[in-house]
Image: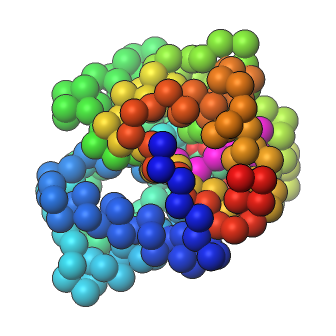
Amino acid sequence: MKVIIARDYKELSKKASSILASQLILKPESVLGLATGSTPIGTYEELIKLHKQGVISFSSVTTFNLDEYYGLDSNNPNSYSYFMRDKLFNHIDIDNNRVHIPNGLTKDIQKECQAYEKKIIGKGGIDIQLLGIGRNGHIGFNEPDIKFEAITHLVNLDTDTIYANARFFKDVKGVPKKAISMGIKTIMNSKKILLLASGEEKAQIVYDTLYGKITPETPASVLQLHPNLIVIVDKQAAKYL
Ligand code: F6R
């Protein structure tokens, strides 16, 4: 694994966007795995800048997002579909037909999850998967558990996750209790993984992830087994490294 310690969130975002940009320069038809949450917002802003400067194009890119809340319409401002349009897709030249996010309104979970897996495989797999990390060690919405959940599936969100994500909602009661998430195997099958963490509240989980025991109780710890993992943390998140 390659661990890069950035001065601050701004530098972290610039470094992450440079890695993603070089991926697109080297392979314009890349398949990107994307994340939501606060952490990648700066990276998306930098990618938009690089696109506007003419350095990168997304016109041949395919994307798969990690997760979506179950029960939220894609036009709901709290849905991850809306987030992605707002923070990235509306500002770049991506073809919407190549954008994939689990359908939170599906009536047939199993079919939706299987179709999502099939689409990823059909595109030749994910070239680079961008990840944030929950304070409880979740990646995507793979919450601490007694086993690693392999493929895209319906998740019961942890209380910790519900409270952590309540900041985006009017109140904690509004946060969905379930989500559809790529599984650990789906994530681990990516050719390259770029894990980002910022801020002191992530310091302990970053340490446990990279140097602790590999256990489904710390889902992100499985990343230690990935052959091509890049981790970018700011100084605060690197406090225990
Ligand atoms: C988002 C996702 C989550 C977040 C994690 C960290 O698509 O899958 O695993 O990456 O909850 O969220 P932030 O960045 O808001 O701290």
The quadrant holding residue 102 is top left
Kindly identify the residue that appears in the image at 28 percent across and 43 percent down. 127
The quadrant holding residue 212 is top right
Q: Is residue 21 visible?
A: yes
Residue 200 in the image: above or below residue 54: above
193 left or right, relative to 238: left
Colour pattern of the rendering: rainbow
Residue 235 in the image: above or below residue 205: below
Residue 225 in the image: above or below residue 2: above
Kindly identify the residue that appears in the image at 19 percent across and 32 percent down. 124
Q: Nearer the viewer, residue 73 or 231?
A: 231
View extreme (bottom): residue: 53
Task: Count the numbered circles shown.
Answer: 0
239 falls in the magenta region: no
Provide the residue span drawn in magenta.
Answer: 131-136
Q: Is residue 168 visible?
A: no
Q: x%, y% of residue 174?
A: 78, 48
62 left or right, relative to 11: left
Q: x%, y% of residue 14?
A: 46, 75
Residue 137 in the image: above or below residue 149: below
Q: Nearer the viewer, residue 4 or 187?
A: 4
Kindly identify the residue that appears in the image at 15 percent across and 55 percent down. 27
Q: x%, y% of residue 61?
A: 21, 54
Q: Main secondary structure of the magenta part?
A: loop
The quadrant holding residue 167 is bottom right
Kindly identify the residue that appears in the image at 19 percent across and 69 percent down. 57
Q: x%, y% of residue 187?
A: 45, 32
